[in-house]
Image (cartoon, rainbow, N blue to C red):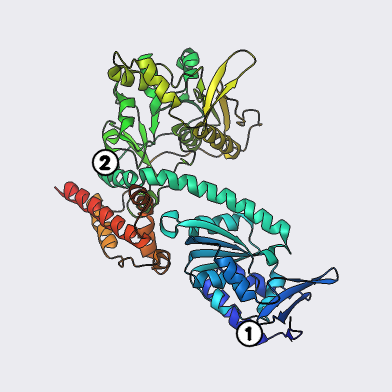
Amino acid sequence: MARMRIMLDPQLFERNMLAVTSQHPPPCAERIRAAQPDGRISVALSREGLPVPYLAVDGRNAYMHSRFDPAREANRLAGQYIKSGFYVFLGLGAGYEIASLIEAGRVAKGLIIEYDAPMLRAILERVDLTHILGDRRLHLLVDPTDAELDDAIASSYVPSVTGNFVSVPIRGRIDLSQAQFQRAADSIRGAISVISDDYSVQSFFGKRWFSNIVRNLEISNKPTPPVGPIREAYVTAAGPSLELYFNEISARPKGTFLIATDTSLRALLERGIEPDAVISIDCQHISYYHFSLGMPERIPLFLDLASPPTVSRLASKPYFFSSGHPLARYITSRFRAFPVLDTSGGNVTHAAVSLAEYLGASVVRVYGADFSYPFGKSYARGTYIYPYFDIRQSRLKPSESLFAEFLYRNQSIDRQEDDNGSFRYVTKPLVAYKERLERLSASISCRLVRVRGFGVHAATASEVPSRRKKPGKLFAAGRPYQKPEEFLTSYAKDIGSLPEPYNHAASYLDGLGAHEKDVWTTMLPSVAAFRREAGELPPEPYELLSRTRSWCATVVLDELKRVAK
């Protein structure tokens, strides 16, 4: 190791900061400039004459890279990473590992997470990192909060475009701040788990969501009288425990607003119970079966904009709302302002509770939300699955076999038993639904009372004292900004005007203007679907983008022709 130490260079620092300011979020530059450089940081030259930062701590020098040949060490590390994709670098140091992976063509897009702004400032005053800090594929986060880290990953990592997720710890750097980087790693795992689950759903339903939303535009243009506010709500899910409470639901106090999930509607109507509202969020056509007994004319049907048009046309009073789909948000800002409900729970019961809170309920009682299969039973009697299987049974495959196949189709299924002899089967998706309802119950302004029945235990906030109640809202869409055909014409033009995707799809998306990015965002869930359909050898991301754009344009233009007739 050469003994020569690299001294502070104010001009070098400003060049580095120019790259930070031009390419990275504003808090990065602000936090670096506000920091006093860490006096324990020095930079020495390696045997090959390359700068190596080190920290003088506890009577020793802790080097961030090899003291002999940091570039060779970085190349050896890069050789261990063979996948291209979205890279998260834990630490920066002098950037050798990052530069090597970029040169190897592995990084489609990436984040650099660096803690300790004083330490980073001391390095930037001595080491030229403009080749890394100025790379448009990379975003730097300096001393990020958990929320900033989650937001950065959520906004940057698009699996269908950026590909594989890869985490690269810069060992010599993270060893100096182990607790902080460990917390970051834990936060990243949580964020990636959420994105992966969401991407999995997009890959199955992305195209269907898009086409349903486009085809619902015309009917969503109809005027509807406002609904609400309300004081107390009952919500009926379709679990087997619902059968225990039909009498209680039928005898509900006057003024209690009964919201039926679409799956439970048929069971209620069979027993002469007419709800005050029905809600549906499923984008699949099978949801049509929930309405096999008809839809009473006076009952409002609350629908996600991504619901099937076949369901939308069943109701004389369809009330549309916007959920998390980017096309729904785009439409809400440019076509008509629809109310927004929380559908992040992934199931209709979660959405029904969100609707009850939106309407101003102070207490919401939920029946039939078992989040399991009590005694091996899937749904309450009277729900769609019974007539559905009755039609499909045969001498060789009676309905009992169909129910058993439905139950055991899940790859991960566990049996739970209670001391009283009752038992139930649980699956990973049902556990996830339960956990999301628990999180919702802890955040909403109303008190959620889940009537358990034979379902799993759930930590809903039934014992929490009354919270500060939000005033109830009227559920009503705003006045349309334009006619459906005008919106479709404009949207089709915007899609057609997008620049042709090219290799390095992530860079292509990053280089678009703000409005162009908004338009592309509306189509990204469909990209995930095209990628899944392509199988094990999908085309390059830019080809997926091109196919998606062409398909989306066709869907919009076909609907425009139908509406214009």
Q: Which of the two discs, 2 and 1, sits closer to the camera?
A: 1
Residue 463 % position (x, y):
65, 28
* Alpha carbon separation for disc pair 2 and 1: 61 Å
Amino acid of disc 2: Ile
- Does any portion of residue 251 appear in the rendered image? no
Please state the total of marks drawn on the protein image. 2
Amino acid of disc 1: Leu
Label 1 environment density (alpha carbons within 10 Å; few <14, some 14–19, many ≥20): some
Q: Which residue is mark 2?
A: 219
Left or right relative to 432: residue 492:
left
Left or right relative to 514: residue 464:
right
Pick whichever, 80 or 168, lies toward us: 80
Residue placed at 29% from the left, 23% from the top? Answer: 292
Q: Which residue is mark 1?
A: 12
Q: Earlier in the sequence, mark 2 or mark 1?
A: 1
- Pick out the residue farthest to the left: 565
Residue 175 % position (x, y):
72, 62
